[in-house]
Amino acid sequence: MKLFVLFFSLLLFVSPSVAQTNVQEICGYKTELDRVLKRQPNYLILQNALFEQAMQEFKSLSNAKRRIEADTLYFEIPVVFHVLYNKTAENLNDTSILSQLRELNNAFRKRNKDTTRIRAIFKPIAADVKIQFVLANKDPQGNASSGITRTYTNKTTFAANQFGTYTTNMKYSANGGKDAWDPTSYLNIWICNMEFPNYVGIVYGFATPPTNAPNWNGTGATKDTNSMESGVVLHYKIVGRNNPLAPVKYVEGKAAIHEVGHYLGLRHVWGDGTNTTGCSVDDGIFDTPNCKAQNATCTGQNSCTDASNDKPDQTENYMDYALDGCAGMFTQQQAFMMRFVLDKLRTGLPYRIVKYDTIPEPAAPLDGFKLYPNPLKEGQNFNVKIPGQNNEYYATSIIDACGKEVFQRNLLANKIHSIETAGLAQAIYFIVVRNAEGKIVFRQKLLIL
Ligand SMILES: [Zn+2]
């Protein structure tokens, strides 16, 4: 367990950390914090208080309840992607955007194949965060929507200079961007060009940390007035898996996962210290080992000795910089923190799903879905075959009449899977199948007699 110590200084946020660490600043978190601090000088004190409150609540739970797996509450967040393009290549196609949504869902539901990268010491704390993302099917006026907007812009870039600073013009229609959809009801993700000609530094993405807790917004001159900027911005070349435009290191769509982590309140695992202050600053999360600075590769080094239970740097974590090629997990406490933020701060955003049986039948259920036998006898296995693309996984759950998920497994399409029901009592259950975008594609009653 690490001490909860945060010695942020304003100087830290404006100093060029690139020079200090020789790691490219690929995420605009420090810049965004600096912007918040200018409006709310006491922001970090309040943010720290929130972290402490969350961790106190975490500690008050029994060991069993600390596991997110035991929580039947799922969150579903409606997302709108705003594509801004000046050149054709920047007008990213739907396939890339859907693949990004899939990567987000795989990461937040621990369905990512990259979980095989997680070292044995960290496997027990890798969390299914139980947050899912769906494309918004209605715009703020209530009109049907695909959840993707496309806007031509006369801006050739939203970078401010070649050193990795940027404007927020992408968030304003009047400035060549696109106004947010009500940020209290949607997660807005802007996709645009963040590259400056002959750039030496580039921020591939940034997210606004939550600022809308009660009493967080200050008063008068310090009142937080940027609520319409709330959301995530991504450089168009790193969106989705295998984006042909992506630099080699950024082909897995991990930057978006990292940024949504910030949006839901997480800090970098190294606590944004420097090589000098590194081991004395922390991210406020106890189950991410202390580390000195960001890791750009999966070295597995141990840069700081923890006071107890010393572990190496968790380069597998989505909130480090190693990302593509290394990352594959959020921890249990990071999951708790993000869910805490959704519950306490971004309260208008998610649909809370407790009982799956209150979810309506999918509009277009999968054709050719096979589930047999049904009804079945207590203790008997059943078989399931999910039609779909080869090598695609579908999250398959069995939900009991109280809405509790009693079984969850990711099943490959077009194969017959035999599912054990040992331990399930005689009752009515629901089997629910979700595609990679988190949409329910099949739902059926399952009767155990
Ligand atoms: Zn970051």
Image: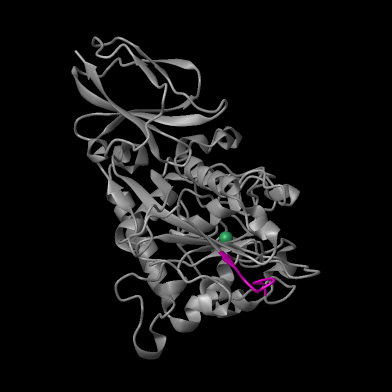
Q: Is residue 65 left or right of residue 331?
A: left
Q: Is residue 198 left or right of residue 249?
A: right
Residue 424 x %, y %? 25, 19
Q: Is residue 254 left or right of residue 180?
A: right
Residue at horizontal 70 percent and vertical 45 percent from the top: 299
Residue 109 x %, y %? 44, 40
Q: Quadrant of residue 427?
A: top left
Residue at horizontal 38 percent and vertical 67 percent from the top: 182
Q: Is residue 157 part of the magenta span, yes or no?
A: yes
Q: Is residue 315 left or right of residue 406?
A: right
Q: Is residue 95 depicted above or below 377 in this figure?
A: below
Taking depth in this image into account, of 271 and 361 the one nearest to the observer is 361
Residue 378 x %, y %? 23, 11
Q: Is residue 357 part of the magenta span, yes or no?
A: no
Taking depth in this image into account, of 58 and 164 the one nearest to the observer is 164
Q: Quadrant of residue 423?
A: top left
Residue 264 x %, y %? 43, 58
**Quarter containing ligand 1?**
bottom right
Residue at horizontal 47 percent and vertical 55 percent from the top: 2
Q: Which residues are magenta?
A: 151-159
Q: Is residue 367 depicted above or below 227 in this figure?
A: above
Q: Is residue 256 depicted above or below 179 in this figure?
A: above
Answer whether residue 56 is visible to the viewer in this image: yes
**Name of the residue lying farthest toward the bottom:** 221
Residue at horizontal 66 percent and vertical 59 percent from the top: 90
Q: Is residue 153 depicted above or below 186 in this figure?
A: below
